Image: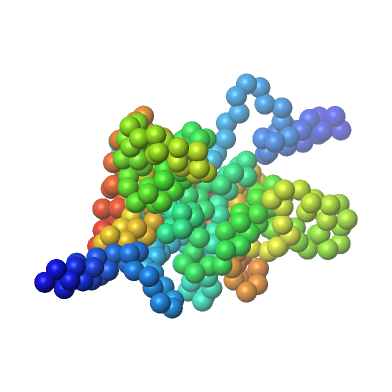
Amino acid sequence: MLRPGLSVAAMALAVSSATAVHAEGLLTHRDLSASMALTMAETAIDTCTKNGYRVSVTIVDREGDTILQVHGDNAGPHTVENSRRKAYTARTFGVPSGEFAERVKNNPGASAVTVLPSIVAIQGGLPIKVGDDVVGAIGVSGAPGGEKDEACSKAAIDKVADLLK
Amino acid sequence: MVRFGFAVVVVALVLAGAAPAQSQGVIMHHDLSALTAMTMAETALETCIKNGNRVSVTVVDRQGETLVQVRGDNATPHTVENSRRKAYTARTFGISSGEFAERVKADPLRWAQTTLPSIIALQGALPIKVGDEVIGAIGVSGSPGGDKDEVCAKAGIDKVADQLK
């Protein structure tokens, strides 16, 4: 009884997460479209503008490469690259960049990772998921406080939620 | 009468173009907004897609810095940077990058300019103007032929023509 139970558990794992299986032949991916990225970026900027903040936004793909980047009206110069790094961080760890920042505080292992290129331990980036599959991330920078940036990232993902499947 | 006529010409020149006049104090600029830039980028992408071409688009500001950059669906990797260079070229010379490419063929000075960073002698970008003042540029890359890229750049500018004043 133990063995069949285990294999059922293994199958459930394989079905629920593509990354856990060793694929044979070509991989099939869902990827973000430019159209979705445009909608997300516009929504994030609109949301932050309504909240009174000047921000820049970057959306990265599955590989962490930039699909779309916008320098928002009157947003500071560093916000462009910072939004990209937040997005990259959220993409590669599959968690909000704010959660990564929390981990860095307590975990020397996590803080060592911040020396890698494009990693930044600052709130404001969220992974974009189809089920458990991280297909990209969005990063926002410019609001006075990462939680205010993250609110705009979340609004953007919510806007296209019905397309993330 | 000759002298008076000359003075009138000088005054007319100063009124017509801010560039030749020495500004006193701060300079007033018209700059592209993020929303206008995004509308242009989206229109350029859509136009090229309708024409059957997969492209990337960059909109640069007055300084040649990127305002919006979008990697279009299934556009090839070099198209992102190529669209930026085309836009930078159109911005800095204030002419279409295709016209610059034509001049490069005949003029050794123009050829020498192509050795500067971000300059590229390829059609597909247009300066964005308010009157005679160049406030940015839009570059498109990915179509089989710069003329086809330029059509999409033009559609992007035409879409926001009423805002360029």
From this view, report whether residue A144 is shown above or below residue B40: above
Residues A4 and A14: in front is A4
From this view, report whether residue B149 is shown above or below residue B108: below
Residue at image point 35% right, 64% down? A19
Residue at image point 28% right, 47% down? A154
- In the rendered image, residue B17, in percent from the top left (x then y), is placed at 68, 38
Q: In this rendering, does residue A132 appear at all? A: yes
Residue at image point 65% right, 50% down? B88
Left or right for B125, reference A26: right
Left or right for A163, reference B34: left
- In the rendered image, residue B58, in percent from the top left (x then y), is placed at 55, 55
Residues B43 and B69: in front is B69
Q: In this rendering, does residue B152 appear at all? A: no
Quarter of the N terminus of chain A within the rendering? bottom left
From this view, report whether residue A45 is shown above or below residue A18: above
* Residue B8 position by quadrant: top right
Residues B59 and B135: in front is B59
Quarter of the C terminus of chain A within the rendering? bottom left
* Residue A10 position by quadrant: bottom left
